[in-house]
Every structure is written in C-alpha cells, then in structure tokens.
Image (cartoon, rainbow, N blue to C red):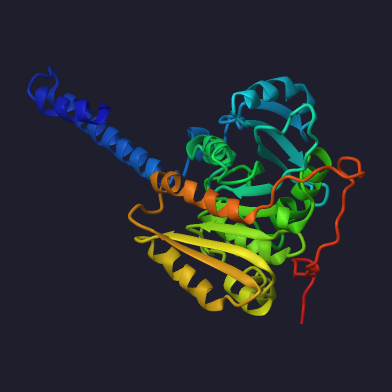
C-alpha cells in the first residue's frame, strides 16, 4: 500500500509543488525507494531469508521470539516453566522454550528453541522421548522454524492425530551472529567455529543431561530445510552411532563455496570429501532412514536429489518426494511440512519407559560403530 500511494503521489503532485524541481525529485526518489523496499520484502517473504530486521543486520534483539517461555542459560530455569507446560499440555499443546546452550567441546554459545510435546510433564510419567534436531536454513535461526514456519503447531497436530509419536524437537542456531555474510554450513571449519561438534556432540550431550530423551540411535533424527537439509544428511552420515534418521527438505549434497561461506576447508580435499553427502553415501554407507525432498521447480535441489539417489545403496533406506508447484520459499515449506512430519512419524520409535539409570546417565551400546571422520585438526590417508 505504501508503494502504491507513493507512486500515485508522483503524478498527482507533479505540477503542484511550489519548487517543482525539488518536489518532483523528492517524490520520485521516495517512490522508487519504497517500491524497491516493497519488492525486497516480498522476496524475503518468499525466501524466508531474514525473519526480522535484526537478523538482516546481525543485531537480533529478541532471540526468544517464537517461543512460549524463557529457560535461561543451559536451560537452568526449565523447572520453573513446568506449571505453564502442564497447563498447555492439558489443552493439547506442546511448549516451546528458548534457552542458550554452551558447548563443552566446541565452546560455542548458541540460542536454542526446544519443543516439549504434550504429555512430557504428566505427573505419573517419566517417559523418555525420541528427539528431532531441526536445522534452519541460511541465514535463518530458531525463530525461522518456530515462528515463520509454525513448526510447533504442526507438531501438536501431528501428535494429536497419531501421525507421529510425541517427540522432543531441538532447534539450534546453526550459525550465530552476524548472519549477513556468515554461512558455516554446520561443519567444523579449518580455523573456524566447530559447528559440527556443537550441533552433534554438544547438543546431544546437553539434551541427554537435561531432558528426558531416548539415547539410542533410532530415537534420534535430524531434519532441516535448504542448508539445514544438507546439515541433517551430512551430520547423520558423519555420526552414524548417534542418528538413525535424516530428513532433507530442499537440501543439497555439498557445501557451497561463495562469498558467504569462504573456503571452509582451506583446500583440504579430505575434509571436502568427508562433508559431501554423495561421496559419504558411496564410501561410508550406514544404516539410515533418509528422506530427500525437492519442489518440482527447484532445479539445483532436484539435481542433488538425483545424485543422492544414484549414490544410495543398502543399508541406507531412501525415500524421495517431489512436491508439485511451490519453490524455495516459505509458502512451500509450510505446505510440505505435514508430509515430512508424517514421514518422520513412520521412522521414530515411541517414548520408552524409564530404566534404573538416573536422568542424564543412561547410555546404550549402538549397533553402528562411531566413525573417526576427518576433522580440521588431523588428516587421513
């Protein structure tokens, strides 16, 4: 409306200005500026690049936007939120809490949103729930998933209609601030942040110590959109002892190398190969339920899906979905999420009864051994 009004103002006031040259120049410049801003806002809406102005300029003032409650550093105030969680659970709603997590190994401090499903706080239940780590796309953050995509409401609906088991969903900030030219692709970069370590080892360790979640690999899934889809596949293949499922929504199969990423691996070919989904499927295939989706008009994502399809072999179980219409934008993501949640519901196990281990000490021997994947501090032959 502002763009339309300012454009109409130009001819309406064209000959009415006392200082015509100045008046005409100002109104034309204002009209052009507002039209450009309106177009940029619409492009941003379609692509969900920046949920807020703060994310655009790297000064997000409210990282808890999109969550219901604040739980503090490392979730220290989780217990204080229980009464509200119980009340929401009685009405069939899960609760999304915002907190920060300090990585013990990576030493990174990142914002994290955690969705706790209905029934998590039932007085007579101490069940351990399956977990989904859900990664935003670049340059997104937890608010992209919780507020922009509306994932908590979709989870409530899927759980209520038995399309998926009650699950804890952890939505981390994969990049941190600043965002405008800061794309780390969820890897441990050479001379960069240890994002892989934070998103895998640190977050998993924190969740096992502070939340009632399953510890077995079938009970842990990774999912994400765009860059987050690549992150989900790459981390699941790099850490096969921890994750049994990965879902990529319009993701790709290899890290980008552009102005926003720079050279993540400092020219090391072993690191590039060890973070390439297609090459990992060829060289290090593990038991994994894998979903790869793309819209019919997403050419790059369709090409990546085809490369993954050609690379897959047992024991990977691949599901491919091509969504009609849409594209790489918010509207398409929202329309596709119920299908993706339904698929995840077929993969994730139900909550399990507690055993004798105290909270945070439960360990289980994985049937899939850990892989000593190449990292920035060492090389492999």
Between 165 and 83, the residue placed more toward the observer is 165
Q: Residue at x 43, y 70 (%)?
A: 303
Identify the residue at the far left of this view.
15
The N terminus sits in image quarter: top left
Give x and y (percent) for residue 44: 40, 42
102 above or below 349? above
Give x and y (percent) for residue 260: 53, 55
Task: Mark yes or no: residue 260 visible.
Answer: no
Give x and y (percent) for residue 221: 66, 54
Between 21 and 244, the residue placed more toward the observer is 244
Identify the residue at the far top of this view.
18
The part of the image, by quadrant, that contains residue 167 is top right
Q: Residue at x 64, y 59 (%)?
A: 245
Identify the residue at the far bottom of this view.
381
- Horizontal side, residue 216 vs residue 229: left or right: right
Task: Mark yes or no: residue 1 visible.
Answer: yes
- Horizontal side, residue 260 vs residue 283: left or right: left
- Horizontal side, residue 96 vs residue 213: left or right: left
């Amino acid at each position: 409306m502002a763009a339309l009004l300012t454009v109409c103002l130009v001819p309406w006031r064209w000959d009415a200005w006392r200082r015509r040259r100045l008046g005409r120049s100002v109104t034309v410049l204002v009209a052009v500026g507002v039209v450009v801003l309106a177009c940029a806002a619409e492009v941003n809406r379609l692509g969900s690049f920046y949920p807020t102005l703060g994310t655009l300029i790297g000064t997000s003032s409210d990282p808890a936007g999109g969550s219901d409650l604040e739980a503090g550093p490392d979730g220290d105030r989780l217990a204080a939120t229980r009464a509200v969680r119980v009340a929401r659970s009685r009405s069939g709603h899960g609760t999304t809490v915002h907190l920060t997590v300090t990585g013990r190994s990576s030493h990174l401090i990142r914002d994290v949103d955690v969705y706790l499903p209905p029934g998590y706080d039932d007085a007579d239940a101490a069940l351990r729930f399956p977990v989904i780590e859900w990664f935003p796309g670049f340059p997104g953050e937890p608010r992209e998933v919780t507020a922009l995509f509306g994932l908590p409401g979709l989870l409530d609906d899927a759980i209520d209609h038995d399309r998926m088991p009650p699950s804890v969903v952890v939505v981390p900030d994969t990049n941190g601030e600043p965002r405008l030219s800061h794309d780390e692709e969820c890897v441990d970069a050479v001379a960069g942040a240890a994002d892989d370590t934070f998103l895998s080892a640190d977050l998993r360790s924190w969740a096992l110590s502070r939340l009632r979640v399953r510890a077995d690999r079938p009970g842990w899934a990774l999912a994400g959109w765009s860059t987050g889809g690549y992150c989900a596949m790459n981390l699941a293949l790099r850490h096969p002892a921890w994750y049994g499922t990965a879902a990529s929504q319009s993701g790709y199969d290899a890290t980008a190398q552009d102005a926003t990423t720079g050279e993540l691996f400092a020219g090391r070919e072993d690191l590039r190969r060890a973070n390439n989904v297609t090459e990992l499927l060829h060289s290090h295939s593990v038991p994994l339920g894998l979903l790869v989706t793309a819209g019919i008009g997403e050419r790059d994502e369709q090409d990546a899906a085809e490369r993954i399809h050609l690379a897959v072999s047992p024991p990977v179980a691949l599901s491919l979905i091509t969504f009609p219409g849409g594209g790489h934008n918010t509207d398409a993501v929202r329309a596709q999420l119920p299908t993706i949640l339904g698929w995840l519901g077929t993969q994730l196990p139900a909550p399990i009864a507690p055993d004798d281990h105290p909270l945070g000490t439960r360990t289980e021997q994985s049937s899939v051994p850990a892989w000593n994947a190449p990292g920035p501090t060492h090389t492999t032959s």
